[in-house]
Amino acid sequence: MLDTTLIILLGLAALGFVSHNTTVAGLDPGFDYYPRHPR
């Protein structure tokens, strides 16, 4: 249970870190933290 949860959290953290770097390279840095539309 705990091992699975830790693996999932680590996986999500890694994916978020990679997607954040990719987003910063291509779009505005704030887009990763605020994915909602400006409206």
Image: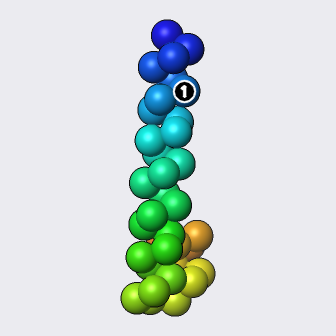
* Residue lying at 48% horizontally and 51% vertically, measured from the top left: 14
* Residue lying at 43% horizontally and 66% vertically, measured from the top left: 19
- Is residue 36 or residue 27 the one in the foreground? 27
Colouring: rainbow
Q: Position of residue 32 (x, y in %)?
A: 52, 72
Numbered label tally: 1
Q: Quadrant of residue 22?
A: bottom left
Q: Position of residue 27 (x, y in %)?
A: 44, 88
* Residue lying at 57% horizontally and 83% vertically, measured from the top left: 29
What's under tag 1, amino acid-wise?
Answer: Leu
- Is residue 36 or residue 29 the one in the foreground? 29
Q: Residues within 10 Å of mark 1 (few under 14, many from 20)?
A: few
* Residue lying at 49% horizontally and 74% vertically, measured from the top left: 21
Position of 10 relative to 26 (above/below): above
Extreme residue toward the top, this view: 1
Residue 37 visible to the viewer: no
Residue 23 visible to the viewer: yes
Q: Position of residue 10 (x, y in %)?
A: 52, 39
Give the residue at mark 1. Answer: 6
- Classify mark 1: helix, strand or loop: helix
Position of 12 relative to 32 (above/below): above
Q: Quadrant of residue 6?
A: top right
